[in-house]
Image (tube, rainbow, N blue to C red):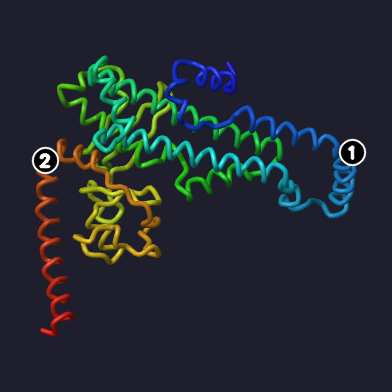
Amino acid sequence: MKFGEAFSDYLRKDRERFLDKCSHVEYKRLKKVLKKCRVCRAAQQHHDEEEEEEEEEEIGRNGALDLCSFESESCSLCDQMFFTELTKEASEIAGCFISRVRRLLHPSDSFGLQRYLWRLRHCFMDDQQIMIQEGRLLLDYITMNSIAIRKILKKYDKIHRSVNGRNFKTKMRAEHLELLQSPWLIELAAFYINLSGSSIGEPGEFFRMFSCDLCDTQPRMIIMLSDCVMYEYSLTCSICLEIVFNPYALGCGHLFCKECACSAASVLLFQGLKAASHEAKCPVGVYSNAVHMTGLDLLVKNRCKDYWKDRLRAERAVMVKQSKRYWELQTVTVFGY
């Protein structure tokens, strides 16, 4: 079965209620945009053939042409309709995924009708059923849409004989729209790994999709999206090179210990990353829209108890020292002594 058919089946099945309020990639519509472009190019085929003949004559005279001369010009029709639409859809999908994960991890934060519906579900389903059902829907949602984006960009490059689709994917990473690199996916995995060790998360096929190894020289988390698709995420802080403690995912998606990130941003620990300047940059990214990875922190606490306690004591000592120094300076500034 072709992916287009599989994606359409996915949208039609029992996920309709889930997708009713969630955006998805308009795969068919984007393919139609590319087909129209293909028709336009067919109309120019005769002109292109004439240019190719001229190029062959040029090659005959000069031996070879620079490979860059074969790069096709960008199509204004596709660039305007295709990439603008895809950027909008990817942004909406990422927003929907984040909001659903937040609601699952912190149901008390829901309000109004959402909170009422969540409590109503508990009347007909047990906790484990709800967690597994929501988790499966979220993983299917992000996986299918990620594949759709990858496929449609590959098709764009094939039709246009260009690398614009590949470049657009790089741009998505830079703008934090790469779905499978979202820190909320790591939080979701940490949530289920933590559940698997509780009375709610009994061993089962779904919980085996998530695993982590914190004892290895390279701490990592593994998510098995299918039998043949596996993603690994490093749990090492790029600054102290230890297992992340009280971790934060910065806007660039990289994980750091809170103390390390605050130090690199030249802000005090008790002030937190919200006090970081918008121009502040970490060694590999930026500080905007930092996410406190509470689920991942709980995972480290449960799996590496002694390490977590030692880091907690050290962080508190630094925070007390910085706070004392900060308020002493504030007193001198205000009162002059």
**Mark 2 and mark 1: span between their CA atoms?**
71 Å
Kind of residue at badge 2: Lys
Q: Is residue 252 left or right of residue 208?
A: right
On the image, the x and y values in percent for residue 95 come to 43, 40
Q: Residue at 89%, 38% (x, y): give it.
A: 46
Residue 24 x/y as whole percent: 51, 31
Label 1 environment density (alpha carbons within 10 Å; few <14, some 14–19, many ≥20): few
Q: Which residue does the numbered mark 2 point to in the structure image?
A: 305
Residue beneath label 1, please? 46
- Residue drawn at the location 40% of the way across and 56% of the way down: 285
Question: Where is residue 109 drawn, in percent x and y?
Answer: 27, 38
Residue 251 drawn above or below residue 325: above
Residue 222, compared with residue 9, is above or below; it is below
- Check disc 1 and give the amino acid type: His
State left or right for residue 186 relative to residue 81: left
Q: Is residue 29 left or right of residue 118?
A: right
Sequence-wise, the earlier of marks 2 and 1 is 1
In which quarter of the view is residue 211 placed?
Answer: top left
